[in-house]
Amino acid sequence: MRWIHAAGRGLLVLVVIMTGYTASGARATEGGGGRGPLTLATAGDLTGYLGPLLEGWNRTHPAERVTLVELPDAADETRAQMATDLRGGNRSRFDVLNIDVNWTSEFAAAGWIRPLPRERFPLDTFLPPVVDTATYDGRLYAVPYVTNAGLLLYRKDILDKEGVAPPRTWAELEHAARTIAPKYGLDGYAGQFLPYEGLTVNAAEAVYSAGGTILGDEGERVTVDSGAAREGIGFLARGFREGWIPKEALTYKEEESKQAFRDGRLLFLRNWPYAYVVASGEGSAVAGKVGAVQLPGPDGPGTSVLGGSNLAVNTHARHPDSAARLIAYLTSEPVQRQVLTKGALPPVRAALYEDPALVRRFPYLPTLRASVLAAAPRPKSPHYDQVSLVVQAVVHDTLAGRQTPEAAVRRLARELDAIADRS
């Protein structure tokens, strides 16, 4: 879990206490609680914005000071530490968790986080799809804090020189990656294809963009055995087989792929919006030469997977009133603005995506808004960690040429069925 880019690095894991919210501030949920100090844990605030933001809270709430606890950067390690702690019940050192959006179902099913009353949070001010990432079995178990969606970054200078519009379809992407990139000594396209959570995201986006799904009914039904899944995984496998996706990309996570683009070695890159900011910044070989569009699909814009993080309440949280007040603070529009301007992280407040001053500073915001509104969550399952490991292993074997997309989809269906049977 890292909170800078949802599927990988920097996804912030906040640990606070919360039970409710009203328009004027906070209100405890059933079970009581009161006010007091809070514990907040993070997997790594790589932009350094969170400390000053929390100092603002601590100055005005001295009796409710927040203590920051940093967990490992790697999503799997962070999740493991959080799960170990939560299994300790009332001995947990964490109060509330800002969890990767794809952990909501697992943590809710395990009884580690409590359901929350929808009416006590300003959910109608958020981008609509982000709320779905915070629900399980029809109930709200978390509050969205940061969202994310994948974008296609491209070398605007090169496409402009060639008189080619940025790709909207897989065929257009593939053609430019095969024909234009070599003329400039570049690799064509890359995403995140190392077997880790980022590969699950890339694979799900390919399947979703082709019109398919992986799981249904909160993980109880396996739906991956479809022509759409074969088409989506086949698109990626073909890129490696034909060479317009470099073999090196089999080792890429977010940072490695971002660096390859920033160094001027790629024509196209699928990554989170932070990569646009870094590639456009000081010291980048491609500064001033970067564009961003929605991910392409077979017949037009495709479907991104939603990234980001949700604030969830530990079942054994201590001071729910203080937690609610802190969460109201963290999801308020002024703080959400700082999440973007100081943390380079996509906020959940819809109005910020149409703020003229912010759009001038972050020109990708309208594209990101469209991507989020068209995005879908990762497969929901109480055994999400196992689901993700299966997807990573099967898809990586396919991209490395060890099995066909057809065989991959059959294997996925078989192995995911075994997981669903445990529910």
Image: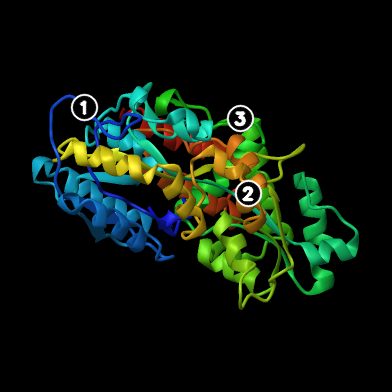
Q: Residue at x 42, y 33 (%)?
A: 380
Q: In this view, does 283 lie to the left or right of 199?
A: right
Q: Which amino acid does label 2 sit on?
A: Leu
Crowd rating for badge 3 (residues with CA inside 10 Å; few <14, some 14–19, many 20+): some
Q: Which amino acid does label 3 sit on?
A: Ser
Report helix, strand or loop for mark 2: helix
Q: What residue type is labelled 1?
A: Thr
- Rendered image: mark on residue 226: 3
Q: Which residue is drawn at 83% across and 61% down?
A: 159
Crowd rating for badge 1 (residues with CA inside 10 Å; few <14, some 14–19, many 20+): some
Residue 77 in view (yes/no):
no
Residue contact at pointers 3 and 1, CB within 8 angstroms = no
Q: In this view, does 63 lie to the left or right of 247?
A: left
Report helix, strand or loop for mark 1: loop
Q: How far apart are marks 2 and 3 (CA)?
A: 34 Å
325 lies above or below 188: above
Which residue bears the numbered disc 1? Answer: 29
Q: How far apart are marks 1 and 2 (CA)?
A: 35 Å
* Viewer-side label of 2, 3: 2
Q: Residue 144: image x %, image y %?
A: 41, 39
Residue in front for this viewpoint, 161 or 20 = 20
Q: How far apart are marks 3 and 1 (CA)?
A: 44 Å
Residue 66 in view (yes/no):
yes
Report helix, strand or loop for mark 3: loop
- Quarter of the picture holding the C terminus: top left
* Image quadrant in which you'd find residue 142: top left
Q: Residue at x 50, y 40 (%)?
A: 349
Residue in front for this viewpoint, 159 or 80 = 159
- Rendered image: mark on residue 365: 2
Residue in front for this viewpoint, 379 or 271 = 271
